[in-house]
Image (cartoon, rainbow, N blue to C red):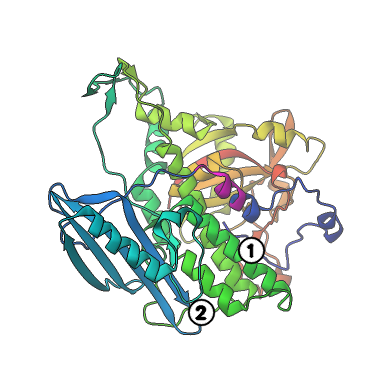
Amino acid sequence: MAPKRKPSVQTEDPEKKKQRGPEEEDTFRSTAEALRAAPAEKRVIRVDSTCPLRGNPGTQVYEDYDCTLNQTNVGNNNNKFYIIQLLKEGDNFVCWNRWGRVGEMGQTKIKQFQKLEDAKKDFEKKFQEKTKNNWAERDHFVAHPGKYTLIEVQGEDEAQEAVVKVDGGPARTVAKRVRPCSLDPATQKLLTNIFSKEMFNNAMALMNLDVKKMPLGKLSKQQIARGFKALEALEEALKDPTGSGQSLEELSSHFYTVIPHNFGRDRPPLINSPEILQAKKDMLLVLADIELAQALQAASEEERIVEEEPHPLDRDYQLLKCQLQLLDSGAPEYKVIQTYLEQTGSSHRRPTLQHVWKVNREGEGDRFQDHSKLGNRRLLWHGTNVAMVAAILTSGLRIMPHSGGRVGKGIYFASENSKSAGYDPTQDTELELDGQRVIVPQGRPIPCPEFRNSTFSQSEYLIYQESQCRLRYLLQVCL
């Protein structure tokens, strides 16, 4: 999530900021590096959704003869796509072309062939004409001015029966018996929600990452990484306009080319300010989080013939690499957190606590131990949509604790760190976590009259050094 900045909140001392070592992660760049280092995905290829032959039994894309092209030019108000596919339909072959403005269905063309060689020639000729690249050299694609750029999109997987080959023999379906789930009912329900495709889609819609932001299909991790690189070039150009060989118009056009946007018939806007750049960074960070979280499930092991296999929710739980311990509602620890939630919740729409889990993310304890001598430890809130929980639990911090007011839409995190909060200190209590005293506010937030003109409804804290913050609790609430 993107940190909001409020001048009334004391963040990191400028001198300390200068002293930060190379080991301190920059969230944006570390995510970009993770995407670039990720192994190439096995492409899922489907017949274009608008092709009239899609529903015909046996019609499929021939081998990997499929490409999605995109071209954006801000100055000329160009924002267009071109899809080329070679389809096999029985004994015949078809070249399918669709092109037009991004976000629109566009125009289409079907050309039939009896010979495969002729269909390949037509496909490869169109690809060369639109991109100035040879199809045989597409793995070393070079973008040319005024031409389309090849982008990587993923078709949606379809449910298939598990089939394996045994000892070189014929393929056969393997029957499997699923063990009962070992998790408590509340944790089962939580995992069902956070790994739900519907929840991911809802999260994308809430963050304006719906089909309007990915109008040509689901982007691969490698394609999202190209978007990060494009924004890095824009950031450098904004810092030093004279140092880049390309204008902001050219760099903006390149970003919209590699990360397709639906602007309707409007001219694509220039990315010419830090605020617009930050909005695009936030968009890519969310796309990356969702992609990495979903990839946890997609990373399947080799099929084996077994009599029993773990329950799917137990497998999902292992993928989190995070221990979740459900607290009893009568436990003192639960009561302290419940009071904290109620006191800091919105007076107009108070959250109702449903469950609390104690959180222990793999490796985070060792990282946090480096700051064992820091005092003034407090719990601060971070709210998020339920679909983002898997990404947060598995892939590093990227959270912004804050205090006061309502937070979150269904899921709260309580994080321990060494920042102060604006609560009535006379009402504070303490919890002991790993031998350390951690202050937990129990009173209402204290208004700050000197900042009454601020548009922020609550104080927010930006943590530059991620290792100074550790997730301690996961709260599920009803708003």
Nearest to viewer (mark 2 / mark 1)? 1
* Left or right: 406 as drawn, with respect to 96: right
Q: Residues within 10 Å of mark 1 (few under 14, many from 20)?
A: some
| Amino acid type at mark 1 | Glu
Q: Where does residue 309 sit, x and y in percent of width and height?
A: 34, 20
Tag count:
2
Q: Is 292 or 84 nearer to us in this picture?
A: 84
Q: Is residue 27 left or right of residue 309?
A: right
Task: Quarter of the image for the N terminus: give it.
Answer: bottom right
The x, y position of residue 325, in whole percent, is 52, 29
The answer to whether any part of residue 2 appears in the image is yes
**Callout 2 amino acid:** Pro
- Secondary structure under tag 1 reads helix
Dot 2 corresponds to which residue? 269
Residue 23 - label = none
Residue stretch rendered in magenta on the structure = 32-39
* Depicted 321 relative to depicted 340: above or below: above
Outermost residue to the bottom: 76
Front in this rendered view, residue 380 or 385? 385
Find out whether the residues at labels 2 and 1 contact each other: C-beta distance under 8 Å.
Answer: no
What residue sits 64% from the left and 54% below the top? Answer: 29
In magenta segment, residue 369: no
Q: Toward the viewer: 141 or 335? A: 141
Residue topped by disc 1: 232
What residue lies at 45% left-to-right and 31% top-to-bottom? 317
Residue at 61% over, 72% down: 275
Decide: is 22 above or below 272.
above
At 23% from the left and 70% from the top, the residue drawn is 108
- Secondary element type, mark 2: loop
Where residue 60 appears, x then y in whole percent?
A: 22, 50
Q: CA distance from mark 2 to mark 1?
A: 18 Å
Q: Is residue 444 visible?
A: no
